[in-house]
Amino acid sequence: MLSLPTVPLLLAAYLGGAVSAQVTTDSHSAASKACGLLKIELPNLIAFPGSAQYGSDIAHWATSSVQNATCSIEPQTSKDVATILGIVGRDDIRAPFAVKGGGHAYNLGHSSTSGVQISMAKFNALTHDPVANTVTIGTGLTWDQVYTLLEPLGIMVAGGRVPGVGIAGLSLGGGYSWKTDQFGLTVDTIVAHDIVLPSGKFVHVTNKTQPDLFFALKGGLNNFGVVTAITYESHPQTLVFAGSVAYAPNVTDQFNNAVANFDLKNSDPKAQVIVTYASVFGQFSSSIDLFYDAPSVPPGVFDEFLSIPSVKSDVKTRKFTEFLSTTFGNGDLGIGPFKVAQNVIPVLKYTIPVLNQMVNQVTTLGASLTQKFNGSVVVVTCSAEPFTLPFAHSKGGAYPHPPSRQVTPGSPFIAVQATADPTQEAILANSVKQLSHAVQATAVQEGQSRWDDLLYPNYAIAGTPLTLMYGSNVPRLNQIAKNVDPRGVMQLTGGPKFGAGHT
């Protein structure tokens, strides 16, 4: 079962901003035709409903992200990917499709489809170049798998913060990491992408060889082809001082003071935290994940948090992988199949009024949704992520993250036990928008946010306008999409779309 100290695992994955395509008779017919041709061309790679491979290929972390594909397929090579794109994108077919890495997308249609489900599971190679200090990783791997492979080498990369998150989804949307204050977002540490373009051409993309496409892939999501591998900068990894601390409701004010003080005063880039306010079963609690990227933490960095009476604490010196697996588990919420909604709140600094508003919204919304979904378990959380200078190492890219405006991604999240009730998704979406607006309104009043602050693509809820995520980069990204995909093959996938007329 889900326990209050493990609520921070709800912050997993960080993929968002997707929109799902409407299923039509024509798209179903096109998908059936594409699956028939794929069965002829790649008979050993395709799967259909009822098979174990199909079940694995369409599986997602949240029930609300799952769709029943017409068929699924696991390409083994870039040539296989080119064959698949050539068939689904044929002028006489135009079948909807999706590309799945880790399957941790929150929004329906981002990595799922009613058409052809492409699973990157077989792209699971990892190569370390000790001379260049880089690691090349196949997009079928999840970040916890990557960390397990890298830790014996004494190195690490700036990737996802929780288990189960696929490397491609996080990397193509920006990527906040436990190392962000030291090295930047994940996109700032990327050296190269291997991609199969919509035309079927394989390209090794670097800033020198393909500067426009390299720019677009650093935050532009799944708009430019199918990425098969990504090369990242690597850095040494020691033991870390890290863990989770959970608090009872009666120390919330003291906890909020500690959070605000940490956000205001901390200047150590090795120290990072995730703060979570949660309502589970209608009961409120708060918790914090503490991370220091060294075996011991200097005096004063986390002292205020550790001095508050806690319900549970497991902060200690340990391996990086042990911290992830112990603190966040396997991502199972313990409530059976569940539906989710997530959004993002851009915040400069988490002042006490902003934190108090998070507490108020989680408490009141948790109570109202628990009553509305009578008999179903409801989880409502809101996270504060007080990075010190998350954009200090910015190297640009599709997702604008300039050092001149260092907003952090506060994030509301709602999960409910899945039922056949078709109104569940709409209620969750409206509720998470309501929570987001209320908290951001307080942050705006505090001078810690602006209504035109850009939203982190991997957290943003479905339907978020491109201009609210990419700002003035939208025209350039539209043009790059038209250049690499003139026939609009990637328009057949879900998620925010670049191309003619998209804003």
Image: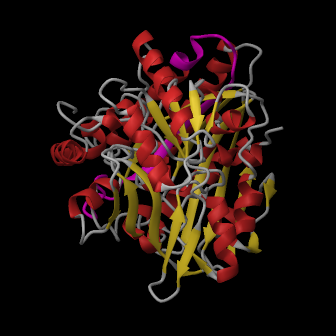
Seen in the image, is 122 located left or right of residue 36? right
Residue drawn at 40 percent across, 31 percent down? 437
Q: Is residue 67 magenta?
A: no
Which region is colored magenta? 398-427
Residue drawn at 79 percent across, 36 percent down? 334
Name the residue at the front extreme.
40
Q: Is residue 258 at all visible to an observer of this figure?
A: no
Q: Nearer the viewer, residue 127 or 161?
A: 127
Residue 127 at x, y percent in the picture: 56, 74
Residue drawn at 55 percent across, 19 percent down? 425
Q: Is residue 402 magenta?
A: yes
Q: Nearer the viewer, residue 376 or 16?
A: 16
Q: Quadrant of the N terminus?
A: top right
Residue drawn at 62 percent across, 34 percent down? 58
Q: How is the image coloured?
A: secondary structure
Seen in the image, is 433 located left or right of residue 104? left
Name the residue at the right extreme.
1
Count all numbered tags in the image, as a single digit.
0
Q: Quadrant of residue 207?
A: bottom left
Residue 493 at x, y percent in the picture: 40, 33
Seen in the image, is 401 located left or right of residue 172? left
Q: Is residue 404 above or below residue 368?
A: below
Residue 270 at x, y percent in the picture: 53, 75
Q: Quadrant of residue 241?
A: bottom right
Q: Is residue 322 at all visible to an observer of this figure?
A: yes
Residue 2 at x, y percent in the picture: 79, 39
Seen in the image, is 50 located left or right of residue 465? right
Q: Quadrant of the C terminus?
A: top left
